[in-house]
Image (cartoon, rainbow, N blue to C red):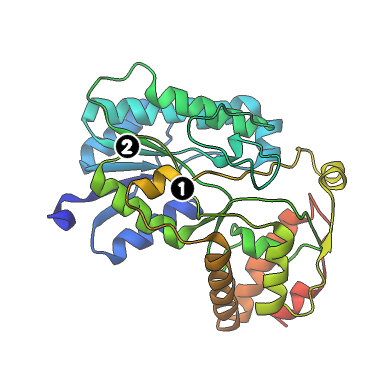
């Protein structure tokens, strides 16, 4: 019964939205992205839902660039907060289960032992982080008693896809890396988790990250070993990094006990990272050089605004 019952409408066509589209399409579910819909416009959102009649809506739509959100606060609030409220209202009125994306960066952890649970009070260090806190509140605000919704908090999504939005691809262009504890979410795992969570109709707030943690510097060493031997990772302190970027560096470790208690098999982050980095390397080596160059140059253009670039990433497409 699961296959025919699952009909999914996705808001947001960024990295995560398209990951869901590919995943659910491969499983022969009915799924589509709501193209050309402004989530701030209730009539457009309601029409998309009423026309498609999904069993589940996944809302990944948001402005996610920290610097941009800090510099364009009204528009960021409009999309991330009011847009989330609009999608929730439309789902509530249509009687549709909603999966809404928040973020793990609403927390700051002191170290690897300072893992944050769903019940801990958020302490964002960026305006973007605050918009995600407010979005969670607006999803639940003045809804009917029957409205079912699930709020997911991922942390630093990574994958084996060669995509300029993938954090691992971004790291191919970096020179210096902090050596501080962070959780992470392998997107290939998140897809399966979400599938199971929808089947279970889980509600409330849920941290969705792989278990344990590692550091950006340790990830850089994996990248050097599996993808870019010429990379020479250097450590940088948070204080030094904060002088180079408009926003304070956020380090977050998430407690995923609730996810595991729901019967979801959560693999260790270090193990999955090693596997994902290796697969990313295989994908890079088999990719068309011109397309690879385009992805890496787009990555470098964005990275140049916040860090010191290396030059060895160019060896990957020469």
Between residues 80 and 33, which one lies in front from this camera angle? 80
User: Is residue 227 shown to the viewer in this render?
Assistant: no
First of labels 2, 1 by sequence position: 2
Check the image and name the residue furthest to the left.
1
Q: Residue furthest front?
A: 113
Residue found at x 31% / y 20%? 143
Instruction: Estimate the x, y position of residue 120 in percent, counting from the top left.
Output: 54, 30
Badge 1 marks a residue whose secondary structure is loop
Residue named by callout 2: 98
Q: Nearer the viewer, residue 5 or 93?
A: 5
Residue occupying image coordinates x 36% and y 46%: 261
Rendered location of residue 182, percent (x, y): 64, 50
In the picture, the disc for residue 306 is none
Image height of 290 relative to 14, above or below: below
Vertical position of residue 258 compared to residue 91: above or below: below
**Going by the image, does 105 lie left or right of 60?**
right
Estimate how packed mark 2 is, as few (under 14), some (14 to 19) or many (20 or more) residues with alpha carbons within 10 Å. Answer: many
Rendered-image quadrant of the N terminus: bottom left
Label placed on residue 208: 1
Q: Split into 4 quadrants, where in the image is the C terminus? A: bottom right
Question: Where does residue 20 sit, x and y in percent of width and height?
Answer: 38, 55
Question: Picture quarter containing residue 233?
Answer: bottom right
**For the point 52% across and 25% down, which residue is it?**
134
Mark 2 residue element: strand
From the viewer's perspective, tell me whether residue 77 is left or right of residue 194. Answer: right
* Residue sitting at x 23%, y 63%: 28
Marks 2/1: CA distance? 16 Å
| Quadrant of res 142 | top left
Q: Quadrant of residue 90?
A: top left
- Label 1 packing within 10 angstroms: few (<14), some (14-19), many (20+): many
Check the image and report above or below for 47 versus 85.
below
Q: Position of residue 248 (x, y in %)?
A: 76, 38
């Amino acid at each position: 019964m699961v296959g025919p019952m699952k009909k999914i409408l996705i808001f947001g066509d960024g990295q995560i939205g398209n990951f869901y589209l590919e995943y659910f399409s491969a499983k022969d579910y009915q799924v589509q992205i709501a193209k050309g819909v402004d989530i701030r416009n209730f009539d457009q959102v309601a029409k998309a839902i009423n026309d498609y009649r999904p069993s589940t809506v996944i809302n990944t739509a948001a402005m996610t660039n920290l610097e941009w959100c800090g510099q364009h606060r009204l528009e960021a609030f409009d999309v991330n907060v009011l847009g989330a409220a609009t999608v929730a209202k439309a789902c509530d009125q249509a009687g549709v289960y909603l999966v809404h994306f928040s973020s793990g960066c609403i927390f700051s952890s002191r170290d690897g032992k300072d893992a944050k649970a769903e019940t801990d009070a958020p302490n964002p260090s960026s305006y973007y982080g605050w918009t995600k806190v407010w979005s969670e509140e607006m999803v639940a605000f003045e809804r009917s008693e029957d409205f079912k919704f699930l709020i997911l908090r991922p942390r630093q999504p990574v994958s084996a896809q060669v995509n300029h939005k993938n954090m691992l691809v971004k790291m191919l262009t970096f020179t210096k890396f902090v050596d501080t504890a962070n959780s992470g979410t392998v997107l290939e795992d998140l897809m399966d988790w979400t599938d199971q969570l929808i089947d279970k109709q889980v509600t409330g707030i849920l941290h969705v990250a792989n278990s344990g943690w590692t550091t950006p510097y340790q990830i850089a060493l994996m990248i050097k070993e599996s993808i870019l031997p010429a990379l020479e990772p250097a450590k940088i302190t948070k204080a030094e990094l904060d002088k180079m970027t408009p926003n304070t560096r956020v380090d977050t470790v998430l407690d995923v006990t609730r996810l595991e208690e729901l019967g979801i098999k959560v693999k260790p982050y270090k193990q999955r990272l090693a596997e994902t980095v290796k697969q990313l390397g295989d994908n890079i080596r088999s990719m068309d050089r011109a397309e690879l160059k385009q992805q890496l140059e787009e990555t470098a253009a964005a990275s140049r605004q916040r860090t010191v670039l290396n030059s060895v990433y160019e060896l990957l497409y020469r």
